[in-house]
Amino acid sequence: MSFAYSDADKAAIYKVITERRDMRHFLPTPIAPELLQKLLQAAHHAPSVGLMQPWRFIRISDVTLRKAIHTLVDEERKLTAQAIGEVEDTARMAEFMRLKVEGILDCGEVLVATLCDQREKHIFGRRTLPEMDLASVSCAIQNLWLAARAEGIGMGWVSLFDPHQLAQLLNLPEGAKPVAILCLGYVNTFYKLPMLVEEGWTTEKPLADMLMENGWQPHESTRT
């Protein structure tokens, strides 16, 4: 007995994985409430260690609050640029400042994905790897991302923010932590390649560089 999907279904799954993009350019077209709920339900179907379901999604519907979040991100963008200039050089810093790193004021919906509070109560699967709660939230975000792409909705994951400041802004309880600002919206087009590749910021590494067998083996290019 085969539990494999049909060839057409398998092709669709691999296609959405391949064509998912971290989007930064959006149209202001609203997302229908029923579609947003469908996407969030896909996120909620994500696996989680010990079935703890540590994800909490906060929908930002208040325009003033959205602008305040944008301000936090813009402040961190400038600080990140300074850090890049210190570690690398001013030319690289200038390149970074030219990049569009978020679409908070442009997209149809903004969500903040957070870790829940009182996570210390969840021991199953976390006794030696407490960061598995973050891994579980990441799975939920990926589910949301893939479902959005399948529906023709772009999504961008923004990580340029001070988590303590954002937690205060959103009145998170003690122990909860924001991990991602998610921009969702319709787009003119999806990037053919990851935006950072298209912009010449970096290049993608092949799978062969990441794949090892029976232990850690340095890639050929790193051997002396």
Image (cartoon, rainbow, N blue to C red):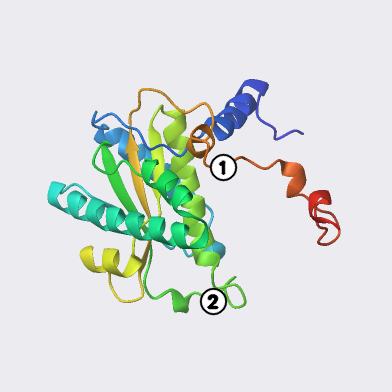
> Could you tell me which residue is drawn at 48 percent across and 44 percent down?
143
Q: Report the label total.
A: 2
At label 1, counting other C-alpha atoms closer than 10 Å, the crowd grade (few under 14, some 14-19, many 20 or more) is: few
Q: Residue at x 52, y 26 (%)?
A: 192
- Helix, strand or loop status at disc 1: loop
Q: What secondary structure is marked by label 2?
A: loop
Numbered tag placed on residue 202 in the rendering: 1
- Residue at far front of view: 90
Task: Describe residue 162's horizontal placement relative to residue 218 as left or right.
Answer: left
Q: How far apart, in angstroms, are the residues tagged by discs 1 and 2?
A: 39 Å
Taking depth in this image into account, of 213 and 197 the one nearest to the observer is: 197
Q: Is residue 53 visible to the viewer in this orientation of the structure?
A: no
| Apparent side of residue 3 relative to residue 123 in the rendered image (left or right) | right
Could you tell me which quadrant the C terminus lies in? Answer: bottom right
Residue 20 shown left or right of residue 179 in the figure: right
Observer-side mark, 1 or 2, equals 1
Whether residue 164 is situated above or below residue 201 in the rendered picture: below
Q: Which of the 4 quarters of the picture holds residue 123?
A: bottom right
Percent position (x, y) of residue 169?
A: 21, 64
Which amino acid, by three-letter code, is at mark 2? Ile
Answer whether residue 150 is visible to the viewer in this image.
Answer: yes
Tag shown at residue 65: none
Quadrant including the N terminus: top right
In the picture of the structure, the residue carrying the numbered disc 2 is 123
* Residue 144: image location, x then y, percent: 44, 43
